[in-house]
Image (cartoon, rainbow, N blue to C red):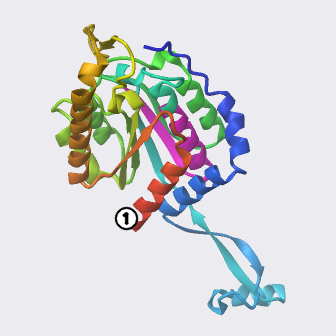
């Protein structure tokens, strides 16, 4: 298992730069169009032009000003976005440069930047078999820095995995009109999560699943010598020959993954699968587009 070395503070500057680039702009645009505000708020007046709808003219204000004015209405942003971030032991794995939890933390950080930039509030639970850290819903630049601080803190990572316990807590903790984004590898699911998952799928306005996988989670390479496999939730280790095991490993791992996805879909929840050796911005932006078509 790779040593946990999380340092997301440089991302603060990175995302300020990325807002001018197409990938982050696309992500931001698709986010704001998916999670529309709850209403319109009056922000002032401007001069009427020939391309405006004449029904929007405010005649009383126009008479007072001596010129034709229309009201300017801005979307009132008040969406409540909450992350459930799996920081259990299976997320502390990498077969290459980046741990799954590092990759997932970058996803949470980038989406947090997008959410706060759109004027919405964001919160987070980092969980394993318990609640490792809670960040209540809040807004503003200061909250982004606080989120980065907690995402970068190794103390918040590690533990066994209990999705059912976390979902039970969230179903009681969050309001009905919340949007929940669950980020996990979904490895180690037991039988306790299904009832709580169904409640969450019905209760919240949106429930999104982002499945973060290391390439080895899906396919065991067969071009190596003997390797040691370790259960992330116990001390069990097994010395194996990948050439003898890879085919059955690949079939079984995909069976388990696809069974989970099918159960999520049965509850009306789609899953976006991402691998840690690939960029995620465009895939998430596309996921928002597909979700908008489904929900709007």
Tell me: residue 157, above or below residue 261: above
Please tell me which residue is depicted at 41% across the width and 44% down the height of the picture. Answer: 181
Looking at the rendered image, the quarter that the C terminus falls into is bottom left
Seen from the viewer's position, the closer of residues 260 and 36 is 260
The x and y percentages for residue 244 are: 24, 20
The x and y percentages for residue 141 are: 66, 40
Tell me: residue 294, above or below residue 280: below
Please tell me which residue is depicted at 54% across the width and 25% down the height of the picture. Answer: 150
Label 1, secondary structure: give it. Answer: helix
Tell me: residue 191, above or below residue 199: above
Please tell me which residue is depicted at 66% across the width and 54% down the height of the picture. Answer: 22
Q: Is residue 109 magenta?
A: yes
Residue that protrudes farthest toward the right in the picture? 66
Seen from the viewer's position, the closer of residues 273 and 125 is 273
Relative horizontal placement of residue 278, taking residue 186 as reference (left or right)? right
Q: Which residues, given as a range, are shown in magenta? A: 104-127
Q: What count of labels does the image hold?
A: 1
Q: Quadrant of residue 257?
A: top left
Tell me: residue 38, above or below residue 48: above
Q: Quadrant of residue 253?
A: top left
The x and y percentages for residue 247 are: 25, 29
Looking at the rendered image, the quarter that the N terminus falls into is top left
Q: Is residue 77 visible?
A: no
Seen from the viewer's position, the closer of residues 101 and 151 is 101
Seen from the viewer's position, the closer of residues 155 and 48 is 155
Q: Which residue is label 1 attached to?
A: 295
Q: Is residue 61 magenta?
A: no
Please tell me which residue is depicted at 23% across the width and 34% down the height of the picture. Answer: 251
């Amino acid at each position: 298992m790779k040593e946990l070395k999380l340092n997301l503070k440089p991302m603060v500057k990175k995302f300020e730069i990325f807002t001018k680039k197409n990938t982050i702009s696309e992500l931001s645009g698709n986010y704001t169009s998916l999670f529309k505000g709850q209403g319109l708020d009056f922000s002032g007046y401007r001069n009427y032009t020939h391309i405006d709808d004449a029904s929007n003219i405010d005649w009383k204000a126009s008479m007072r000003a001596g010129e034709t004015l229309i009201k300017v209405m801005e979307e009132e942003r008040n969406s409540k976005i909450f992350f459930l971030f799996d920081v259990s032991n299976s997320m502390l794995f990498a077969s290459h440069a980046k741990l799954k939890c590092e990759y997932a933390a970058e996803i949470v950080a980038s989406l947090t930047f997008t959410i706060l930039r759109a004027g919405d509030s964001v919160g987070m639970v980092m969980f394993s078999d318990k609640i490792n850290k809670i960040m209540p819903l809040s807004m503003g630049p200061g909250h982004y820095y606080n989120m980065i601080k907690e995402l970068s803190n190794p103390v918040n990572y590690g533990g066994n995995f209990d999705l059912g316990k976390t979902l039970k807590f969230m179903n009681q903790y969050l309001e009905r009109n919340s949007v929940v984004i669950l980020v996990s590898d979904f490895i180690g699911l037991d039988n306790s999560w299904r009832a709580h998952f169904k409640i969450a799928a019905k209760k919240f306005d949106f429930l999104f699943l982002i499945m973060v996988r290391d390439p080895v989670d899906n396919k065991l390479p067969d071009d190596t010598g003997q390797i040691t496999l370790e259960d992330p939730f116990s001390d069990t280790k097994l010395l194996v020959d990948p050439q003898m095991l890879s085919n059955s490993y690949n079939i079984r791992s995909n069976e388990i993954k696809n069974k989970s996805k099918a159960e999520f879909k049965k509850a009306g929840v789609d899953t976006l699968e991402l691998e840690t050796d690939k960029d995620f911005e465009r895939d998430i932006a596309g996921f928002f587009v597909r979700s908008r078509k489904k929900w709007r």
